[in-house]
Image (cartoon, rainbow, N blue to C red):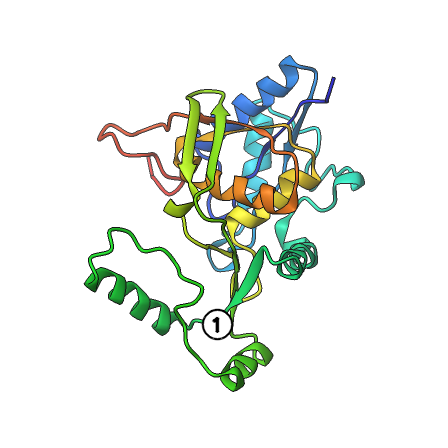
């Protein structure tokens, strides 16, 4: 039987809060019930928003709750690579280049102003929801080469047309989304950092995560992640999306809420 491996992967943009603690607890108990492994790793590529002591807060408070990871940045298993995303940017770049080489991704040279214009034109045409179009931008080959040399581009996943991405959610049953509802999305930003959806797939694959248990706000991320798994031909984990914890006003509790 395949070893059950779950993970809790917070961002150090805040301290441990009740929603994160519950997610960690569910993943920890699920893994331990099946004699599996519970992994803690850090999604720390949002450098501008990272707070001092964010990582220590997560680990120290989880330990206070009795939730001790089997693997973490402080207790790594070298088989699975680095446990902080900021320490594996070269890994993400390698996989992005692989997708570009096999035609599943491409460089997108739109500037922020050109993207805003594309949004505006879509709204003017009464398009219900903006979908990125790879062929919208018209620039000369000379300008394209200039932007390429200056690294003025992002990288987007090339989505197939009319493909259904579906999964049997452990909490909610079958969920399905058509690729035409998503549009080609960014996997590598112009600053060289991977987006969340791309990095998390690479991390889960490399760490052999078998089950992903997380909040329901990630449901919209799942079809994008399934598209990335398909592009690489990788086996997908099982997904389960938990209800969110709300405050007295019915709004999602944030890591920045004060009590």
Residue behind mark 1: 109
Q: Residue at x 63, y 13 (%)?
A: 33
Q: Quadrant of the N terminus?
A: top right
Percent position (x, y) of residue 151? 56, 74
Q: Residue at x 36, y 73 (%)?
A: 114
User: In the image, is residue 258 above or below residue 191?
Assistant: above
Based on the displayed image, in which of its 4 quarters is residue 39 positioned?
top right
Crowd tier of the residue under label 1, counting other residues whose Cα lies within 10 Å: few below 14, some 14–19, many 20 or above: many
Q: How many callouts does the rendering have?
A: 1
Q: Is residue 42 visible?
A: no
Percent position (x, y) of residue 255? 40, 40
Q: Nearer the viewer, residue 166 or 161?
A: 161
Q: Residue at x 47, y 83 (%)?
A: 140
Position of residue 59 in the picture relative to residue 244 (left or right) = right
User: In the image, is residue 67 above or below residue 251?
Assistant: above
Q: Name the outermost residue toward the front.
A: 162
Q: Name the outermost residue toward the bottom.
A: 142
Percent position (x, y) of residue 215? 43, 31
Secondary structure, mark 1, is: loop
Percent position (x, y) of residue 36? 69, 20
Q: Name the outermost residue toward the top.
A: 33
Q: Quadrant of the C terminus?
A: top left
Q: Nearer the viewer, residue 176 or 245?
A: 176
Q: Is residue 1 visible?
A: yes
User: In the image, is residue 208 above or below residue 242?
Assistant: below
């Amino acid at each position: 039987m395949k070893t059950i491996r779950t993970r809790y992967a917070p961002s150090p943009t805040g301290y441990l809060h009740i929603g994160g603690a519950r997610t960690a607890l569910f993943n920890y108990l699920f893994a331990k019930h099946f004699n599996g492994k519970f992994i803690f790793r850090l999604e720390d590529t949002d450098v501008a928003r990272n707070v001092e002591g964010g990582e220590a807060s997560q680990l120290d408070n989880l330990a206070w709750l009795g939730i001790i990871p089997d693997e973490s940045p402080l207790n790594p298993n070298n088989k699975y690579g680095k446990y902080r995303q900021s320490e594996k940017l070269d890994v993400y770049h390698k996989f992005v280049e692989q997708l570009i080489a096999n035609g599943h991704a491409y460089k997108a040279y739109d500037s922020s102003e050109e993207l805003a214009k594309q949004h505006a034109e879509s709204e003017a045409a009464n398009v219900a929801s903006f979908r990125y179009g790879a062929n919208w931008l018209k620039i000369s080959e000379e300008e394209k080469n200039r932007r390429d040399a200056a690294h003025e581009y992002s990288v987007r996943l090339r989505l197939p047309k009319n493909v259904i991405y579906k999964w049997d959610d452990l909490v909610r049953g079958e969920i399905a989304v058509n690729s035409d509802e998503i549009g080609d999305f960014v996997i590598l930003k112009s600053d060289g950092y991977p987006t969340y959806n791309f990095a998390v797939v690479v991390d889960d694959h490399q760490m052999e995560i078998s089950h992903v248990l997380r909040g329901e706000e990630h449901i919209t991320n799942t079809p994008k992640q399934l598209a990335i798994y398909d592009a690489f031909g990788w086996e997908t984990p099982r997904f389960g999306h938990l209800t969110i914890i709300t405050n007295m006003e019915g709004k999602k509790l944030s890591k920045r809420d004060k009590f």
